[in-house]
Amino acid sequence: MLGDRWICDRVPTDRFPDYTRGNAGEVLADPVSPLAWSFCWEPGPVQGCVDGFEQMGVFDRIEYGDPPASFGLFGGYFYNSLTQARLFGIRSGAGWEAVDQTYYDGASQEIPPYVEADWHIDECKTKKLVATMAWVSTTESVPEVELQKLEAKALRDSRPDIGSQTDEQLVARAFSIQRHLRVQFASVVWASMGSSVGPGVLPALLGEIEPDAIAKLMTGIGDVDSAGIAGRIFDISRIVRGSADLTAAFDGDLAGLLDRVASSDSTEAQASATQSFLSAVDDFMYEHGGRGPNEWDVYQRSYETNPTMLLQAIERTRHAADDADPARSLARGIAERQRLIDKYEGEFAGNEEALGAFQTAVRTLQVWMGARERVKSSNIRCHNEVRICFDELGRRMVERGHLEHAQQFYMLLAEELDDFLANPGSFTARLAEREQDYRSLYDLEPPYIVNGAAPPLAEWKRRGEGDYKQVQVGDVLTGVAGSPGHATGTARVMLDLSDPTVLEPGDILIAPSTDPSWTPLFLVAEGVITDIGAVGTHAVIVSRELGIPCVPSIADASKRIPTGATITINGSLGTVTIDALP
């Protein structure tokens, strides 16, 4: 039975007392599995976050304590350190208030007060951080990001024949990847900071002149990895649409489709389409196979470990019209972005300070928005290599009668791996019981804020509890102006990707949050609304690149707006209007 805390939970420290779910759901949306946290996150991103902030000059490692308080985990749910973010604001000169606005814009939860301490202000760190920000604001490229992409690719290419490895060799390979998880995540910290410069500068310059221009200047960046997933899937869907045999296959059961297509008899022309399809799927799996829902948790399935997810994405996308081609949307976005750059460089020509600030914002958006998505892609590729090893071990343990199913392997803690391999039978009952406890965490509603101490799990609300005020016709809900444009359509609330086929062309997708596995649905949707998020979150970035409106941070939108409502989304203004209820 669950106690007051989950087995992986952390305890807030006196120095780092405050944590928030703000911007956390896009990283680890569901309660993280014990093995993912203890094997991947504790030695990887938790340490890599400290490395990144220390390299920038924000903190000294000793300030974090041991284990470092760079992230929180309460009830199995991932939290960002609000204290860490506030101190970054203080030491960078932006102020802690600016950080609060980022985390709490559109949130209804009570904000914990900032409590000043003598060690918060550090002139030496501020001096170093100012120098860091100067480089971030002036660099024309980040070649380190491309180098890490090559390193992640090399790790994928070094994958041995998994089936021929011993249990011990699989564990050893997984351990060898931990160093990549740490180093790669330090770059996530850098890229996240870099990508925040433009959104921080543009509102002050254009907010009262042309608010619509802010989102448009963040559009058409190009070479954004998450949007690239949509482009690949769209191209495959066109192969399917152009082939009678493939269309017939997708009209049937998706289970086993790839094997049936590979072994089917076709005319010469259809055989060519079939080969193109299978080759495109193989290429996609190589480049993007590690992506999937809640992809930072190796317990969750990826495209490679569950190919049906890719087939479902193709199935939805094949119904989209040709003008949904992401390449066309990108071209329109690039042209509009360049028009605005030319316009405002002309208007600011007589104001050297404003022109410099504008050009800095535009340059950092071009350099760091794509870099932020790329470093995430590289990170996920490394995590997937761990997943491949552990999935095989889980499969073997099922065959040997030690586990009920392969996913139970992820109920282990990292420190239990050696004992498990030595005597797996002794863990059978323990892991089955732990899995029941783990699944019960999904029923909990994590508090948005942890202030000083996490409440006992028995005091957490259950999902579905609570009084959410339902919308009425004529209501105008306000969130964040994310991706420009407006559209009217039918609301479609989706809490997960268990059945992506419910989204119909023309629907407006409403979700708590999204990650790259949702991207194919954006090709079908007229617009996207999320409960949480900001201008730099996944839903917004991909929506901008695909040319559809997006409004994040509509508090409890997925609970308050019913499926079937007719709504109008205005991504330029950050509003959602309720036109009719079902």
Image (cartoon, grey):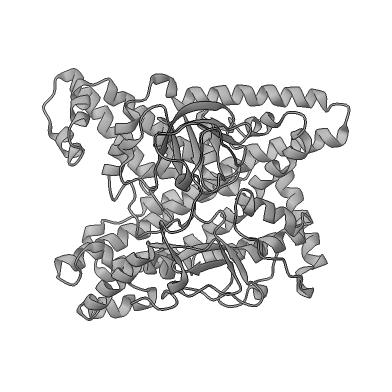
Where residue 487 appears, x then y in whole percent?
51, 26
Q: Quadrant of the N terminus?
A: bottom left
Q: Position of residue 209 (x, y in %)?
A: 77, 29
Q: Would you place residue 181 above or below residue 253 in this image?
A: below
Residue 578 versus residue 440 in the image, above or below: above
Q: Quadrant of residue 465?
A: bottom left
Give the residue drawn at x 30%, y 65%. 170
Q: Is residue 339 left or right of 267 when viewed as pictured?
A: right
- Position above or below: 424 against 529: below
Along the viewing direction, whichever of 427 and 190 lies nearer the viewer: 427
Q: In the image, is 234 to the left or to the right of 58?
A: left
Relative to 497, 89 lies left or right: right
Residue 195 appears in the figure:
yes
Q: Residue at x 70, y 60 (%)?
A: 88
| In front of the other: 190 or 542 | 542
**Image: 203 above or below 149:** above
Total marks drawn? 0
Residue 228 drawn at (x, y percent): 46, 35
Is residue 451 found left or right of 86 in the rendered image?
Answer: left
Give residue 546's position: percent from left, percent from top. 50, 30
Q: Residue at x 15, y 65 (%)?
A: 399
Quadrant location of residue 36? Answer: bottom left
Front residue of this view, candidates 183 and 230: 230
Of residues 30 and 541, the one drawn nearer to the viewer in this rendering? 30
The quadrant of the image that shows the C terminus is top left
Q: Can residue 165 be seen here?
A: no
